[in-house]
Image: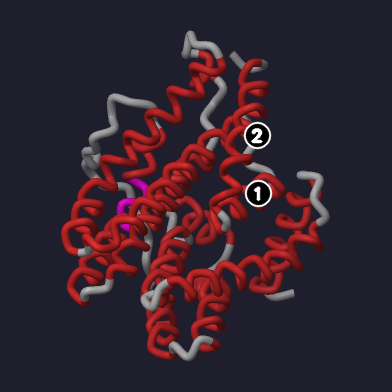
Amino acid sequence: MTALSYFARLQFKRMHRTLHDLGVNPWLIYVSAPLLFTGGSIAVFSRTSYAGWIYVAIAAVALFQLGKPTRLDFLRQVFNKPAYWRIRILENTLTVAPFVTFLLFKHEPRFALGLLALAAATLPFRTRPARTVLPTPFSTHPFEFAIGFRNFVGALLIAYLLMAIGVYVGNGQLSIATLLLVVLVCSNYYAWCEPLLYVWVYHLTPTSFLWLKVKTAVWHLTIILLPLLLMAVTFFPGDWLAVLAVLATGYGFLALSVLAKYAAFPQGVSIPQGILMAASLVFPPLLIGSIPYFFRVAKNNISLKI
């Protein structure tokens, strides 16, 4: 068995076992994931003519995540150099393949070729911690945004670049879509669960604790969104209603992400919970029911921890 086939089989077995341990039928995920990806892609392309830029930005964030030094160091230790590069090529190819396929289906060959070029360019890419700590306006508050901002600053720069492109070409839809992209990046800050000790230090009731977390998340997201928001309403004042709808959806989804984290704490969000979150983002009226649901579950869960 070659190193490449061994690595592929090992990753598949890990994913299969993880899904099974979560109490989810793995084959249900294998079937539903492509359908959800296709449905989400259709929704993006049906709502903005600049969906290709957003699509490439999302794929770029995924590619950059593969360049984390810890995982690359592990691969270098386990596999020899030729096998390491074959694995990197396989990872990047599989990451962009769904995006490229849908871009070709939508007759967007330039974006598809650009994404393939990006996948090749990021092969030697390796995210490294800065020699000096990147300053943030979040250091005196709970850690999620301070850590997340430093780890995903590249994704935020892409969002700001997309906003600038939208303003330059005079496309309000692209500019407004960047607001939602920032929300998705910031919501990902809550994908990691802290040690239990980080929750014990709060002398708060479960309700007060959750309210503090949501309030802090909303305030920090506002700090990041404010420059983009000002640009959107300044250059596209006629789209204020769309901006308001995106903000309402974005803040609601961020609150949902915070509550979902503590509904599953100290484990990660389960597959069914993730599906409900994704459905609430695609169809925002579901937030009216999903936010109270996750709040109840999080409150009951945290009451057992603090």
| Residue 155 in sight here | no
Q: Is residue 266 above or below residue 276?
A: above
Q: Secondary structure at mark 2?
A: helix
Give, as a three-letter code, the residue at label 1. Leu
Give the mark nearer the N terminus: 2 vs 1: 1
Q: Which of the two residues, 214 or 81, is positioned nearer the viewer here?
A: 214
Rendered-image quadrant of the C terminus? top right
Q: Which residues are magenta?
A: 150-154
Give, as a three-letter code, the residue at label 2. Tyr
Residue at 65% over, 66% down: 36
Helix, strand or loop: magenta stretch: helix
Location of mark 1 (residue): 276
Q: Is residue 119 above or below residue 158?
A: below
Rendered-image quadrant of the N terminus? bottom right
Q: Quadrant of residue 116?
A: bottom left
Residue at 63% over, 32% down: 263
Location of mark 2 (residue): 293
Q: Secondary structure at mark 1?
A: helix
Q: Was residue 101 drawn as part of the magenta stretch in this picture?
A: no
| Residue 174 in sight here | yes
Left of 200 or right of it: where is 21? right
Q: Quadrant of residue 7?
A: bottom right
Q: Which of the two residues, 48 or 191, is positioned nearer the viewer here?
A: 48
- Residues marked 2 and 1 touching at CB (< 8 Å): yes
> Residue 142, how many percent across, how many down?
38, 27
Q: Is residue 148 above or below residue 295?
A: below
**Residue reaching furthest top?**
203
Q: Which of the two residues, 72 or 122, is positioned nearer the viewer here?
A: 122
Residue at 21% over, 41% down: 132
Label 1 CA crowd tier, 10 Å (few <14, some 14–19, many 20+): some
Label 2 CA crowd tier, 10 Å (few <14, some 14–19, many 20+): some
Left of 245 or right of it: where is 31? right
